[in-house]
Image: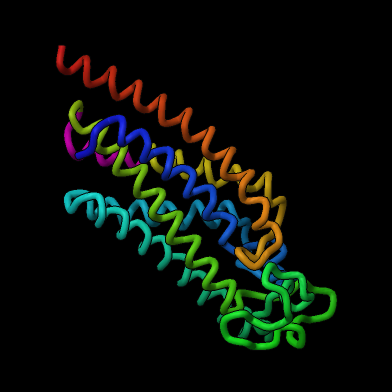
Amino acid sequence: MVDPLIATIMIIAGGVLVGVCVHFIPASATGAMAAATGIATGPSMLSAGAGLTGIYAAAYSIDSGLVLVIVSGAVGSALMLLITIFCGNIMLAFGIGAPPVSGQTASGKSTFGGTKDIITGFEQEGYASPGTDGHGMPFQTAVSGTIGALMGGAGGALVFYAVYSMTLPGIATENAVTLAGIVAAGVFLINSVLPAYVLVGKTEGMFDMKIRSMHRTFISCLVTSSIVACVIYAISWLAVSEVIV
């Protein structure tokens, strides 16, 4: 277990990680029509789904220490996203015959410039259908999404373990795990929605120019997570005091 003040800092750090991770996860509502690069849903909601999966995974390692809890959360979140990417690309390629291609890179407007996938070197420009902004999840955006999922899963696991540590002295272990999961999910949802006001629509992750606005998300999530962490600390302190009295 960790000190309550350290746990409070962990909640803040975890909340910020959750918010920042959204900028790395390529997603788009227009992706449902195969008219844009990314998974066919909003970045915030996809991040929230991956994060909740990470929290579930972290819960199974709660008795193994902080490090394994964080690793479990990160890996669980990344696996969920990778499976989603794989299934989405399979349906896109074999369902409608559209190859994965980065719209930002095809138009030469990605953060790294050029019209090639920065990892595989595949030319993107020739695969983008007229009237679209890309399709599916090419390799570079899949890597960006994996990085984001690892960050988000680790952040959610941090919050989960911190809340668990703060509530355990006052309630039974199984109840502490349940409560920590609920609170961590709430913190994840709050911080994953805030970046939506910065991204305003689709993103191609770290290869999208919108990544340069990440500092705004960092500040908003830092303030929000700090307030939430202080409230959780105050409640846990009162609860423990009641038990001691």
Q: Residue 118, located in which quarter of the rendered image? A: bottom right
Say whether residue 104 is magenta: no
The location of residue 203, given as percent across then percent down, is 67, 61
Residue nearest the observer in this picture, 25 or 98: 25
Whether residue 182 is visible: no
Most prominent secondary structure in the magenta stretch? helix
Q: Residue furthest top?
A: 245
Whether residue 45 is visible: yes
Residue nearest the observer in this picture, 2 or 175: 2
**Residue visible at 79% across and 73% down in the picture:** 132
- On screen, residue 18 above or below 223: below
**Residue visible at 19% across and 39% down in the picture:** 1
Left or right, residue 155 beside residue 124? left
Left or right, residue 121 beside residue 65? right
**Residue visible at 56% across and 44% down in the picture:** 218
- Residue range of the region highlighted in magenta in the rendering: 171-181
